[in-house]
Image (cartoon, grey):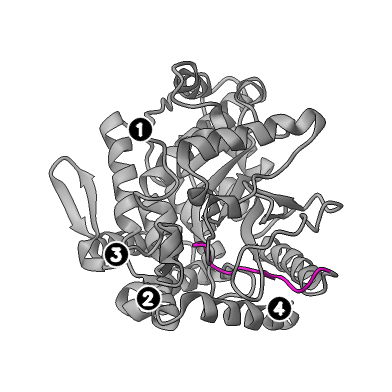
Amino acid sequence: MSFNFKNPKIQKHMLEGYFGLEKESLRVTPQGFLAHTPHPFADNPNMERDFCENQTELITNVTDSPEAVWKELASLQKKAVATLLNLKTGKELLWPFSNPPYVLGEKDIPIASYQGELHGKELYREYLASKYGKRKMLFSGIHFNFSFSNALLEEGYAESSLDTIREYKDSIYLELAKKVTRYSWLIVYLTAASSVMDGSFFRDEERGRIVLKNLASPRCSKIGYWNDFVPLLKYDTLQSYVESIESYVEQGQLKEAAELYYPVRLKPAGENTLEHLKNTGVNHIELRMLDLNPLEPVGIRKDDLLFIHYFILYLMSLEDGEFLPFEQTMAVRNEKSASKYEEQSIWIETGWNSCFPVRHAALQVLSAMNHFYEKFENKNALFAIRFQEQKIYCPEKRYAVQVRTLFREDYVKRGIAQAEKLAQELEFVI
C-alpha cells in the first residue's frame, strides 16, 4: 500500500502535509525548584497543563509545513516566557530539559486540577500517579503530529484497489504506524538530549547530586514512559487495531487508551477516543519519542522537524509488510537501546539473530534515504540527511553529548542560566 512516488501525479503532492506540535515544559523558579503558582495561561487554549499544575503544554494549530509549525511553536514559547518573566508573584522560567530539576518529593508535584465535567481528567491523573509514581510524569517531551495532504491521499487511492478512500486512508496510516514504530530507535538516537539528571528524581535525599547514567534519553529508556507489559497490536485493519487496544483495557492492563505508552499513536479528528477513531477513521499520526532540546530556544531544531518529515515520506516508499509480535517487541527493545548514552552499548536488532552497532544501522538507513531523494534531486532533503549524518560521523555533535559536556558539573544551576539565556535568544528567533 506504499505510495508510488514514481507516479507524477503522486510525486506532485509528495511534500504536502499537515503538521502540529505539542511541547511539554515544567515551570520553575529562578532557584531551580518546581513552581507552585496557579496555571497562568488559563485563558489560552494553546497553553494547557499536562500531568501536573506546573507542567505547561504548548499546543500549536495545524500548519502546512515543518517550517510553519516551528514558527508557531516559537511564537507560543515567546508568549509563555514573556508571561512567566512578568508574573506578579515573581519571575518563573520554562525548564528547557526533558529531565526535571530539583524535586522535593511527590508533594512537589500537584496533579492538574479539573472541575465539573472535566473532573474525570483529574481522577485519571490520580490513577497514573498511583500506578507509575508522580516523578515519572515529570518527564517532558515533544509530540509531532502529521497527516498527508488530501490531494496526495486521493492520488494514492486512485491507484489502489480499495473500495473507499476512508479504507485507503486507514490502511496508509496503519502502514505508517508500523514503519515508524519499527524505526523509532533512529529518531531517538538522533534527537536524544537528556543525558544529565538530578539525584532528587530518584531519592529525596539525593537533591543536588549529579546523576550520569548510561542514558541519553531517560524518558525513552527502561525507566521512562512505558507500560509494565509490551503491547502487541494488530495492524491489518483499523477495526482490529482498535480492538487490540480495547482488549488491554477490558483485561484491566490499561485504564483507558491514553495509557498506551507507545512510540506512535493513530488519532481521529476531534474527540480522541477509540470509539471515535473506529467510527470516523484515522486523521493523523502522533510521534511521541522526541526529547526537549535544551540547546535550542524553541526546544527543538527546525532541521530535526524537516528530517522527520522526509523520513516519513521515505518510509512510505518502502514495501509494506507484516509487523509480527516478535518484531513489535524487538522495536520496543531497539528504542530503549537507542536511548543509551554510550554508543558502543547500543545494538539494533534487525531480525532473528541479526544485530548491528547503532552507527552501522543508522548509516544504512540514511544511505538508503539519500539514494531515494537523489532520484528526485531534492537538495533540501539531501541537506537534512547530511545534517543527521554529522551526528554519527562526529559523535560530539549528538545533543546528548553536548548536554553532558555543558551541564554535568552543576545541572540545575547551569540549567537555570540556560533557561535565562534561551529566553533572551527567543527575541531573535522570528
Sequence-first disc among 1 and 2: 1
Q: CA distance from mark 1 to mark 2?
A: 31 Å
Predominant secondary structure in magenta? loop
Percent coordinates x, y for residue 144 in the rendering: 58, 52
Q: Residue at x 42, y 50 (%)?
A: 224
Q: Nearer the viewer, mark 4 or mark 1?
A: 1
Q: CA distance from mark 2 to mark 4?
A: 24 Å
Q: Residue 41's image quarter?
A: bottom right
Q: CA distance from mark 1 to mark 3?
A: 23 Å
Percent coordinates x, y for residue 376 in the rendering: 49, 62
In this rendering, position of residue 352 left or right of residue 205: left
Instruction: Name the residue that disc number 4 marks.
Output: 426
Instruction: Name the residue that disc number 3 marks.
Output: 214
- Could you tell me the amino acid type at mark 1? Phe
Instruction: Name the residue that disc number 2 marks.
Output: 401
Residue 229 numbered tag? 1
Q: Which residues are magenta?
A: 89-101
Q: Nearer the viewer, mark 3 or mark 4?
A: 3
